[in-house]
Image (cartoon, rainbow, N blue to C red):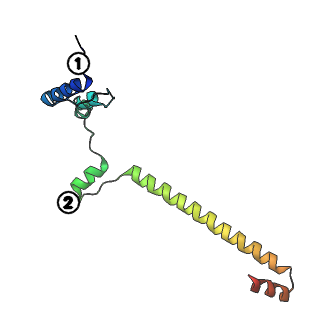
Amino acid sequence: MSAVPRARLLDLMKVQCQIFSTTFNPEGIRMGNKILRQRLRGPSLAKYYPPKGPTINTLEKEFRSMGLETLDEEEDDRQEHLAGQVARVFAVCVAWVLLTLSQSESAWKGRPEEEADSTREKR
């Protein structure tokens, strides 16, 4: 009794995969087909959690056509906080510029006028 050649077994596997619509993988490489064939879990997980309730923004969009105004305290607080931060950063920048200018003026005050003019021209 002789063994069946490998080439003939591979041909048989290839035909078998075509018939049963499976992937031909003679080397047995892990390809993830088992995972990809599974049912998707996203829709069932999304159904598990209840839908989000209306937010201030969605209510405002719905009632804007009627001319109604809404008050969003969280957004107002956020805007005030950002305005305060911008003001602080602006104040720091102005203070830095003024400090830099005062230091450069004080450096020029101690020199004679001719020497100060000649060094300014070199820059």
* Numbered circle sitting on residue 4: 1
Q: Quarter-wise, where is residue 93 in the image?
A: bottom right
User: Could you give the CA–CA distance between mark 2 and mark 1, rounded to whole angstroms?
Assistant: 80 Å
Answer yes or no: do the residues labelled 2 and 1 have beta carbons within 8 Å? Answer: no
Residue at 80% across, 87% down: 118
Task: Find residue 115 and report its horizontal and vertical position in percent.
Answer: 84, 86
Q: Quadrant of residue 34?
A: top left
Residue 109 x, y percent position in the rendering: 83, 80
Q: Residue shown at 24%/27% (left/top)? A: 7
Q: 110 or 118, which lies in front?
A: 118
SS under mark 1: loop
- Sequence-wise, which precedes: disc 2 or disc 1? 1
Q: Position of residue 112 (x, y in %)?
A: 87, 85
Residue 10 locus on image (x, y percent): 23, 26
The correct choice, above or below, for 4 with respect to 25 in the image is above
Number of the label disc, if any, that sits on residue 65:
2
* Neighbours of disc 2 within 10 Å: few (<14), some (14-19), many (20+): few
